[in-house]
């Protein structure tokens, strides 16, 4: 019996356009988030982990790690659904600024603005530059940050000759994300994907 893989629900490269805007749901940052991230990263700086010490700082309490906020923003971007199953690689971050602290109990969300797209045929997709504005109630944090992602193209919509060219170009690409690029699109609804041959 062969399992049918779920179809990607994210947007393919050709479905992104400059000027599009996507807003995520909110996420409340908890004490547990900060403690867990300190253990994961090894960053036990007192401004994150020492309540007594933090009372004497300009913030007056413990603050979330800047990189924890960045990680949560990445997760919120995925939760919009537009990146699910169609991202090839997370390529770069530009101009990220931590404007204000994120405190325990703060709820943040991300607003994603598409500001640039560029076809990268050899990778089987294209680059999408996204401006990320992080909102926390009445103020913005990380405003204007830009992230570049490599997105798949929908091969099912390509003419046969372009599919062949795409596969030839990808096979000549020597880069770390080539195995990801070669991931085929989901089969049409109602058709099960053939089981891979077993290696001897």
Image (cartoon, rainbow, N blue to C red):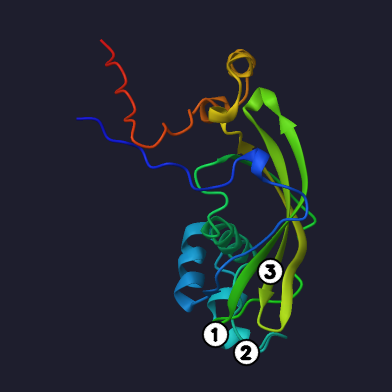
The residue positioned 80% from the left and 56% from the top of the image is 95
Q: Residue furthest left?
A: 1
Q: Which of disc 2 and disc 3 is earlier in sequence? A: 2
Q: Are marks 2 and 1 in contact (CB under 8 Å)?
A: yes
Residue 9 image point, x, y percent = 49, 48
Residue 104 image point, x, y percent = 55, 81
The residue positioned 62% from the left and 89% from the top of the image is 55
Q: Are marks 3 and 1 in contact (CB under 8 Å)?
A: no
Cα separation between marks 2 and 1? 6 Å
Q: Quadrant of the N terminus?
A: top left
Secondary structure at badge 2 equals: loop
Residue wearing tag 3 = 134
Is 33 placed above or below 124 here? below
Q: Are marks 3 and 2 in contact (CB under 8 Å)?
A: no
Question: What label does residue 55 carry, if any?
Answer: 2
Residue wearing tag 1 = 51
Q: Which of disc 1 and disc 3 is earlier in sequence? A: 1
Q: Residues within 10 Å of mark 1 (few under 14, many from 20)?
A: some
The residue positioned 62% from the left and 14% from the top of the image is 161
Left or right: 61 in relation to 32? right
Question: What label does residue 70 carry, if any?
Answer: none
Q: Residue furthest top?
A: 200
Cα separation between marks 3 and 2? 25 Å
Cα separation between marks 3 and 1? 25 Å
Q: In which quadrant of the rendered view does residue 105 lie?
A: bottom right
Secondary structure at badge 3 equals: strand
- Nearest the viewer among 176 and 167 is 167
Left or right: 19 in relation to 109? right
Residue 84 image point, x, y percent = 51, 48
Secondary structure at badge 1 equals: helix
């Amino acid at each position: 019996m062969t399992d049918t893989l779920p179809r990607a629900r994210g947007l393919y490269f050709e479905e992104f356009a400059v000027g599009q805007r996507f807003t995520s749901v909110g996420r409340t940052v908890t004490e547990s988030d900060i403690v867990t991230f300190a253990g994961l990263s090894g960053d036990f700086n007192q401004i994150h982990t020492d309540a007594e010490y933090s009372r004497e700082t300009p913030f007056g309490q413990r603050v979330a790690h800047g990189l924890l906020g960045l990680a949560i923003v990445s997760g919120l971007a995925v939760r919009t659904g537009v990146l699910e199953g169609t991202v090839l690689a997370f390529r770069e971050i530009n101009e990220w600024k931590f404007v204000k602290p994120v405190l325990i109990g703060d709820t943040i969300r991300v607003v994603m603005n598409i500001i640039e797209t560029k076809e990268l045929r050899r990778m089987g997709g294209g680059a999408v530059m996204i401006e990320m504005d992080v909102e926390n109630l009445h103020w913005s944090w990380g405003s204007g940050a830009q992230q570049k992602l490599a997105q798949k193209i929908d091969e099912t919509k390509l003419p046969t000759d372009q599919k062949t060219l795409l596969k030839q170009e990808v096979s000549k690409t020597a880069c770390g994300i080539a195995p990801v690029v070669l991931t085929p699109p989901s089969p049409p609804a109602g058709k099960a994907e053939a089981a891979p041959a077993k290696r001897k």
